[in-house]
Image (cartoon, coloured by chain):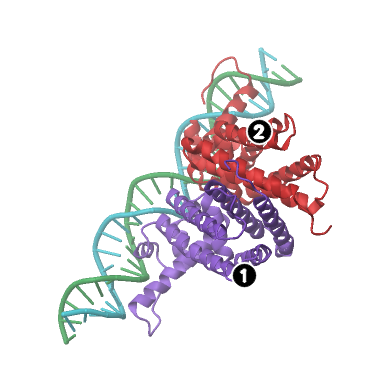
Chain colours: A red, B purple, C green, D cyan
Amino acid sequence: MTAATGETRGERKERTRRAILDAALDLCEDSSLVALSLRQVAKQVGVVPTAFYRHFDSIEALGLALVDESFVSLRAMLRDVRRGDPTFAAIVDRSVDVLVEHVRGQHQHFAFIVRERAAGPLSVREEIRRQIELFERELATDLDQLPGTDPWSAEDLRSLSKLIVGAMVSTAEALLNAPASHEKAIAETARTQLRMVLVGALNWRSRSS
Amino acid sequence: MTAATGETRGERKERTRRAILDAALDLCEDSSLVALSLRQVAKQVGVVPTAFYRHFDSIEALGLALVDESFVSLRAMLRDVRRGDPTFAAIVDRSVDVLVEHVRGQHQHFAFIVRERAAGPLSVREEIRRQIELFERELATDLDQLPGTDPWSAEDLRSLSKLIVGAMVSTAEALLNAPASHEKAIAETARTQLRMVLVGALNWRSRSS
DNA sequence: CGCAATGGTGTACGTCTGTACACCGAAACT
DNA sequence: AGTTTCGGTGTACAGACGTACACCATTGCG
């Protein structure tokens, strides 16, 4: 990291920071954060190991930063889904299309989340779960505003949104682990699943009612 | 690993092998196989590092052995589910009960699978996926024999079983990551989800029909 | 009985790890 | 202009890593 002209101090620091984040995302792509060493990252960035500490306290802290920026991708995705008319049929098709597109475009971020959600340092796992739970709650309030949701109790609503988020995570995993040629088939499966769930929900009578 | 009387050579070897498997299962419980060192395992077992090679070629091979024995737990679970009358309502309740019970009893095996499915050495990930796919196919043929499944195409059936397996995996994850006090709530959520899915499936008209 | 097979040991190596410390040069503040 | 701040460097060390090798003691087969 030697120089480059016409850059303010802060800009240069930010550039190195980005390089570290990218290197980490790259290096742990086929293992996990917990198997990633500070020295590997530093070498890939082209910086001496101790320079790492100028940006992060530890690999774990780096991980939390990656969680944050990965969820920016996810939130952008949700915005895309919410835009457009809220017919059930339209929602399903648009959701799946947007998911496929974002997984393709933000491959590394999605892979990171899916991996580190299960493996990964404790604090990273917790943060990812927290964020996903947040999604589930948002989805629940979205669903609540749709027509035909009267017979759903609050618990049913939560269960339903967990189910949908889970199915979406599974779909993302499938997309990440299959060659691009399977993309259309996976998308079709996801559409079928979403439709089935919606048919089930719309024919639902809460047990407690 | 010094001695113990009245043991055949093979018995002793098997005992050490088990100790290694257990140690590995234990040590990687809050990280991953990819962050597990042969020396850690050897130390925990109480054996010199090089002795490890008498049993496994590498940590990766150890991992494959752990996958095998973990899926024995899962298959035992499936047998329990299949036993009993095949009413839809009965299936839902029994499935969830059996899942909760097995996750509690085989905590380490389930946690191992859930973790290493996403992180973990490539061959381990592949093997886990292969086994889960096998489950999905089995579930599909089980479902096919139930009454009221006429309007499902083969693709619908696959999508449905993927959805159900996915929901079960999510439920297992939730059980693994939540305190025991949440167990009943998680089970109730899982029951609701399964029922919703079944309601959806039973009201289903295949698109291609 | 004797000899091969084998599970476990101990030493030894080169490599990689995290991190402490002293240092440098340019940007940024006064 | 002088001084501070700070991202990055280089050296250094103790510990953990995988693994090669020679060895030992017991089992178990002929």
Is B207 situated left or right of B89 in this image? left
Question: Which residue is disc 1 drawn over?
Answer: B85
Decide: is A171 above or below A13: below
Crowdedness of circle 1 by 10 Å Cα count: few (<14), some, many (20+)?
few
Where's residue A157, x and y in %?
77, 49
Q: Which mark is residue A143?
A: none
- In this view, the residue in front, B146 or A68, is B146
Say which quarter of the image contains residue A165: top right
- In this view, the residue in front, B129 or B51, is B129
Is A152 situated left or right of A106 in this image? right
Say which quarter of the image contains residue C7: bottom left
Label 1 is found on which chain of the structure? B
Decide: is B174 above or below B4: above
Is A85 situated left or right of B158 in this image? right
Q: Amino acid at mark 2?
A: Arg
Taking the spot 62% from the left edge, 70% from the top edge, the residue there is B85
Is A205 situated left or right of A21 in this image? right
